Image (cartoon, rainbow, N blue to C red):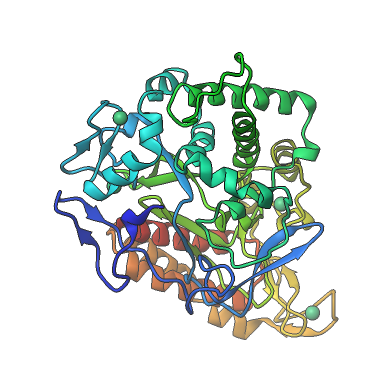
Amino acid sequence: MMNMLIKDKHSKNVIMESGTTKPQEPEVYRGQNDVYPAFSNAVSVKYNETEGRHAVAGSDVPIGKVLLTERAYASFLLSEYSHSHCTNCFVRLVAPLPCPDCLRVAFCGEICKTTALKSYHAIECSVLPALFSADVSVPCLIALRIITQRPLKYFLDLRPKLLNHTQRPRNKHQPDNYVNLYNLVTHREKRSLEDILHRTHLAAFYLSCLKKTNYFAVDCNTGGQPTDDELFIGCLLLHHLMLLQINAFEVGELGDDQDTVLIGGSIYPTLALLNHSCDPCIARYHRGTTVVIHNIRELRAGEAITENYGPMYMYHSKEERQKTLKNSYWFECNCIACRQDWPTWEQMKTDTSLRIRCINCKNAIIVTTGSIAFAVQCTVCSKTTNLLPILQALKGADNTFLVAKQLIGQHNYEKALSKLIALLSLLHKHMVPPFKDYQLCQQGISQCIMTLGYKF
Ligand SMILES: [Zn+2]
Ligand SMILES: [Zn+2]
Ligand SMILES: [Zn+2]
Ligand SMILES: [Zn+2]
């Protein structure tokens, strides 16, 4: 699958005959992980009953390293981009190649065209108009694409392996192996009857679309009743609809005003293993349909590597976040921002106190700016921390941040990034988040990584 993106890993961006630029995929930090090849060797996947499979740092990781590069298992481009972007790899079109039978899709070159026409588009070509006019959502279209990109026989042969649905890692986690995708969580047991019934109706609709194509080649006379194979594929569609609701990702590109614009959706079986935090430690961007993540702060060995599923502590109160996560993802968030009930951005903005790091136990010592003390006592370990050398070290921090902001304004993201990385390390050494400057600095790092990543 997705062989259109395979190329010499040492090459720069590849210019195709059609004039389209194929983006280079960055290599992961310290080489590929042995069991989860999309992850870096600095990432370790753990398992426990409460958190399921989840990723942690296997060693200390400096800021800004590539922790994952993963090609999409399946993707779907939004219909409004079908004439400006390649249906197969999502790159912008220069000299589009159309499908010989419809006007619904276009490709960047012969490789993408052949890949699509020999797999999913051979099935979807006749039903795309119906799906687009029914305003089918992207996760639902991906649920169908997971089926159409592989022949029926592929799923029938895998059937015995799918009966033993498990979260526990077994063999090498190849991102293009359907079994790894199938084993992602669905929270089926936590869903209401209404939820399952609604998705069963959707699965039945997509199954009826598939039956209008040549996907099920043999036409058995069953008197209108679905065949065993059709029922099996219908069950897989239902399974996909449940797992995509939780695990699908939006795919974006950098718009003209430097904002991320949503162009489609994808499913990444390895990226989907990251758990949620209301204060995530990664920035994510796409190159075509490939996703790349970098850490936006230093990671200590054993620290969780986390994504954000929607609610951020900066913009939503703990109560709002817990409600959203419970309703859509069926879990109670236990991230540090929820455990310590961190202030939102609005509350943090006006707080002028300093959260100094205790030199002994590393906990926060709150110092009000009106205080004239030169040494402060930690309420956790009772040891005293001398403030003068810390304030001396932090003296130039405001100015460094302003310089970095100017560099961003001048689109010099590389230089801005190195300044912000040094600043965040300094802030982290002497102070304990959450506080305003730390968040601004981390946001700046995220912005630089994403802009540099999208621009390739
Ligand atoms: Zn393409
Ligand atoms: Zn077509
Ligand atoms: Zn949380
Ligand atoms: Zn202490």
The picture quadrant where one finds residue 223 is top right
The image quadrant of residue 299 is: bottom right
Residue projecting furthest to the front: 221
Q: Please name the residue shown 69% across and 74% down the image.
A: 302
Dividing the image into 4 quarters, which one contains the C terminus? Answer: bottom left
Relative vertical location of residue 306 with respect to residue 84 in this rendering, above or below: below
* Number of numbered discs: 0
Residue depicted at 32% across the width and 71% down the height: 9
Q: Is residue 319 visible?
A: yes
Q: Residue at x 65, y 61 (%)?
A: 434
- Front residue of this view, candidates 380 and 251: 251
95 displayed left or right of 80: left
Residue 59 at x, y = what percent?
61, 80
Q: Quadrant of residue 47?
A: bottom right
Asked whether 132 or 144 is in front, the reply is 144
Q: Residue at x 65, y 42 (%)?
A: 316
Residue 236 on image: x %, y %: 62, 37
Please name whichever residue, 436 or 169, is drawn nearer the observer in this view of the structure. 169
Residue 87 shows in the view: no
Residue 424 x, y percent position in the rendering: 52, 71
In front of the other: 43 or 64:
43
Residue 200 image offset from top left, x and y in percent: 67, 25
